[in-house]
Amino acid sequence: MHEPANDGNANSWFTAGFKEKGPDWSKRTYHYNNNQQPGSLWYHDHAMGLTRVNLLAGLIGAYVIRHPEVEGPLELPHGEEFDRPLIVFDRSFRKDGSIYMNSTGNNPSIHPQWQPEYFGDLIIVNGKAWPKMTVRRRKYRLRIINASNARFFRLFFTNGLEFIHVASDSTYLVEPVVTNETLLAPSEIADVVVDFSKAKTDEAVLANDAPYPYPSGDPVNELNGRVMKFTIKKEREVDTWRVPDKLIQYPSPDLSSATQTRYIAMYEYTSDTDEPTHLYINGKPYEAPATETPKAGTSEIWNVINLTEDNHPMHIHLAVFTVLDQTELVKAEEFKACMSKMNDAIKCQISKHARGKKLRVAAHEKGWKNVYKMTPGYVTRILVRFSYIHSNTSYSFDPTGMPGYVYHCHVSNYIAFPFMFGGYIFKYKTLENADLGSRRQCDDEATCGDEVRSNIGRKKSKV
C-alpha cells in the first residue's frame, strides 16, 4: 500500500535511460514504506501494451513483508532454508532454449499480434523448468505465487501430503486450514506449511490438474501437469517449528460499515469469427474518466457481474477485500441482452436474476484478499476496504494524487490493443474524506525475490 505515483501505472512507462516516458511518468525512484500487515506480495511490470512481453522476459519478483514481533510468537517455519517463495508460471521455448511467444494474433485483420491469453508448454518455478528441491523431514513454509499470464493451477501432492494454509495472498488467516489441493488463479498466492515428516515416500511431486483455459479448456498433459519435485531425506529429526491453532486476528468484515454499493459488469466483445476483440468494464474503455470514487478510510460493497465466458481473477490495487458470496445468474442471456443495451444493473433487475445456486467460498479464502476468481455467469459480492487492516486506520500517505490506482483482471493481452486496456482495470483516486477515482487496464507474469520488514516503525525500502 503506497502513494499512487509509486503504484506502477500502465502509462508510467519509460525506456532505457528515461529517453522516452509515458504520459503518467513522474519519477525515477519509487519508495515503498511497507507500512502494512506482514505477508506475501509480488511485483511485476505494468507497462501499457507490453506487460505480457516484459513479464515473459522476467520483470517480476516475490516481495515478502515481515514483522518479527507479530509473526515470531507463531513459531511458523522461517529462515532462508525453511521459508521459500515459489514463483510458478508457464513458458514455451525454442530448441535453443530461448523463450518462444507466438507473434500471430487471433484476429490478424484487427491487430496482427494481439492474443487474449498466453499458455506456455512447460511449468517453471523460480526460473527453472520442473526443478527439484531436497527437504528434511520437517515443516516448510511455501509461499506459492501464480505468476502465469492466464493459466490456473490446481495444485496437489502426488503422495498425498496436505497443504496447511496460514495466509491467503498478503494476509494471515485467523486459523490454519488444511486442504488436499489448492486452486490458484493468476496473481493469487497460497501461503502454506507442508509437513514433510508426514510423507510415506522419499519424494513428492507437486502436480497440477487445472484445465486451460480454466475451467472448461484442455486437460493438462505430462509437460504442464508437473510443477516440481521434492526429494525427502530419509533421516528423522526433531522439528522446532509448529502451526498454532490461532494465527492473526484482523477486523472481521462489517457490512454495516459499507458506505456505498457498486455494480461492476465485465463485458467481452468478439469479431465476426467469434474471436475476442476487447473487454470493457461497465461498457467503458481504459481511457475513460475514473468511474469508481471511494473515500479513503471507508468500505464498500462491490457486486462484480461476470458476463463473459471466462473466469477472471480480479486484483484491486491499494485495497484489500473479502469475498461474501457468489450467486449464479438465472436467465443470464436475458440479463446480458438488457445490460448490453442499458448498461445498468438496477434497471436490468439484477435482483431478479441473481437468484441461482451459490458457490461456496473455500475456508482458506475467507480472509482479506488482493485477488479473487470471478466466476463466469455469476455475481461475486465483495466487501472492499480502503484502509489498513493491521491498525484499523486510514493510510499514512496521501492516496489522492495522480495517476490514481487501478483494478483489473490478471489475464491480459500480448501487445497493446486500444480496447483491451479499457477492460479490466480501473483507476480510482483515494481521498481523505473526499472522493477517490477508478479506471481499468490489463496485466500478467517470473522470478527472483526481495524481502523486507514491515515498516510499522521501520526502515523504508527502495526498489
Image (cartoon, rainbow, N blue to C red):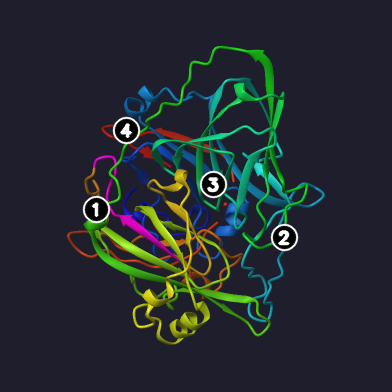
Label 2 neighbourhood size at 10 Å, few (<14), some (14-19), many (20+)?
few
Residue at 66%, 13% in the rendered image: 235
Label 4 neighbourhood size at 10 Å, few (<14), some (14-19), many (20+)?
some
Q: Secondary structure at mark 1?
A: loop
Magenta-drawn segment: 379-391
Is tag 3's residue or tag 2's residue first in the polypeptide sequence?
A: 3
Label 1 neighbourhood size at 10 Å, few (<14), some (14-19), many (20+)?
some
Is residue 257 covered in magenta?
no
Q: Secondary structure at mark 2?
A: loop
Which residue was labeled with disc 1? 398
Is tag 1's residue or tag 4's residue first in the polypeptide sequence?
A: 1
> Quadrant of the image for the C terminus?
top left
In the displayed structure, would residue 67 be above or below residue 183? Answer: above
The answer to whether 424 appears left or right of 204 in the picture is: left
Q: CA distance from mark 1 to mark 4?
A: 19 Å
Which residue was labeled with disc 4? 459
Label 3 neighbourhood size at 10 Å, few (<14), some (14-19), many (20+)?
many
Which residue was labeled with disc 3? 60
Amino acid type at mark 1: Asp
Is tag 4's residue or tag 2's residue first in the polypeptide sequence?
A: 2
Amino acid type at mark 4: Lys
The answer to whether 237 appears left or right of 46 in the picture is: right
**Residue farthest toward the bottom in the current orientation of the protein:** 341
Which residue was labeled with disc 2? 218
Q: CA distance from mark 4 to mark 3?
A: 23 Å
Is residue 390 covered in magenta?
yes
